[in-house]
């Protein structure tokens, strides 16, 4: 498969490529997410007599492989078809797409693709407006609400500051924030708390997923407040630099919640061996963000499908070769 990131770097304006590729501070957390996987090795089991089964069932539905499309903003910066192309690819490959609150296509139009959709939410200081957005997502058929918990403020991203990237180009907008002719800005507030999660549980029947958990105590608290799933994530290194790699945080958080709810992880997942490593360390599935964007920028829907197909093929082979049982005993740190 061609290097979709290299193609994306060539095709996209520098400010747009840097928006997708960049992170907070000196971007050590961005790089550490991938480097942490490189420090892990596999010790396969043999003669287990078990054929690999990639399908996974989660609170928001089933996927044919344990690789979900992570919520990423502004897909129309990468390709004119934007989130529609991504959703069509996810539907064709029978996996879940988590639609960003900051998508450049409205959730109602994305839902028409027939993809299994979850909706990612930044809780807004205006809770009435937040509830209206949640209502739109639920009415459109989204099957889970993914509440991003790691963004009380917006992280400092030097690439965006250097490029002067602040607003979307003319003709593009965060369509899920549109009410009539007005598109509201996404707002962040340090006052967002567990009480807001309780409120969301009252206003929607969608299962609640808490994304951005990096501490086991918060994972336990999330379960206590009704979370149906916990996502281990450092926001791809885009919010706070020097945060530990998500894969390194995963085992402790998986231990903290036990069998109460499933755990997923994102950040640095680039190969099928990464997927299998994450599953062995306690994840039910992984989320993939930047590789999806690079596929979209390079070849639109076809590129996203190719990324998902590669993950499927590599994961199936890695799972077969690592063998059963797929647990922590097959992972080594070098």
Image (tube, rainbow, N blue to C red):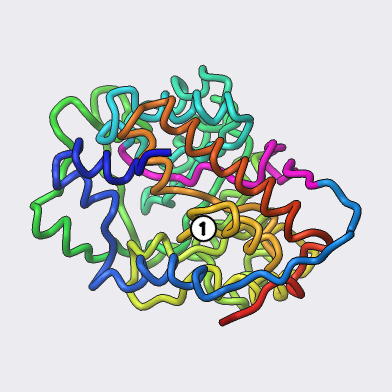
Q: Secondary structure at mark 1?
A: strand
Q: Residue at x 45, y 76 (%)?
A: 244
Left or right side of 128 for 312: right
Q: Residue at x 60, y 70 (%)?
A: 250
Q: Residue furthest front?
A: 47
Where in the figure is residue 94, as x and y percent of width and height?
63, 30
Above or below, 41 against 293 in this view is below
Left or right side of 128 for 65: right
Residue stretch rendered in magenta on the structure:
52-74
Where in the figure is residue 275, as x and y percent of width and height?
61, 56
Left or right side of 207 for 140: left
Q: Residue at x 52, y 68 (%)?
A: 37
**Considering the image in quadrants, where does the N terminus appear?**
top left
> Along the line of sight, which residue is nearer the eye, 275 or 243?
275
- Location of mark 1 (residue): 266
Left or right side of 90 for 11: left
Query: For the stretch drawn in magenta, what is the main secondary structure?
Result: loop
Q: Residue 64 lies in magenta, yes or no?
A: yes
> Along the line of sight, which residue is nearer the eye, 110 or 183?
110
* Residue 26, picture quadrant: bottom left
* Residue 294, picture quadrant: top left
> Along the line of sight, which residue is nearer the eye, 188 or 268?
268
Q: Residue furthest top?
A: 112
């Amino acid at each position: 498969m061609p290097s979709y990131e290299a193609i994306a770097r060539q095709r996209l304006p520098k400010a747009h490529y840097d928006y997708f590729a960049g992170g907070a501070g000196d971007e050590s957390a961005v790089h550490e997410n991938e480097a942490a996987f490189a420090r892990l090795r596999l010790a396969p089991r043999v003669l287990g007599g078990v054929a690999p089964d990639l399908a996974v069932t989660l609170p928001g539905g089933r996927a044919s492989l344990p690789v979900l499309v992570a919520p990423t903003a502004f897909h129309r910066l990468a390709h004119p078809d934007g989130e529609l192309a991504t959703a069509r690819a996810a539907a064709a490959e029978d996996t879940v797409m988590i639609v960003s609150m900051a998508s450049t296509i409205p959730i109602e139009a994305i839902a028409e693709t027939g993809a299994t959709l979850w909706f990612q939410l930044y809780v807004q200081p205006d809770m009435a407006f937040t509830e209206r957005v949640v209502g739109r997502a639920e009415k459109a058929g989204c099957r889970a609400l993914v509440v991003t918990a790691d963004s009380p403020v917006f992280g400092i991203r030097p690439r965006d500051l250097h490029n002067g990237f602040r607003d979307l180009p003319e003709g593009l907008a965060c369509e899920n924030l549109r009410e009539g002719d007005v598109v509201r800005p996404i707002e962040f507030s340090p006052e967002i708390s567990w009480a807001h999660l309780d409120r969301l549980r009252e206003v929607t029947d969608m299962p609640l997923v808490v994304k951005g958990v990096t501490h086991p105590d918060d994972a336990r608290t999330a379960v206590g407040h009704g979370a149906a799933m916990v996502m281990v994530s450092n926001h791809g290194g885009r919010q706070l630099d020097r945060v530990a790699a998500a894969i390194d945080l995963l085992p402790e958080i998986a231990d903290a919640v036990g069998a109460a709810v499933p755990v997923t992880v994102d950040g640095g997942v680039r190969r099928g061996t990464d997927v299998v490593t994450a599953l062995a360390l306690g994840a039910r599935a992984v989320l993939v963000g930047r590789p999806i964007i690079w596929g979209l920028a390079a070849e639109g829907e076809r590129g996203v499908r190719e990324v998902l197909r590669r993950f499927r093929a590599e994961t199936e082979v890695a799972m077969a070769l690592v063998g059963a049982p797929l647990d922590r005993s097959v992972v080594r740190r070098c």
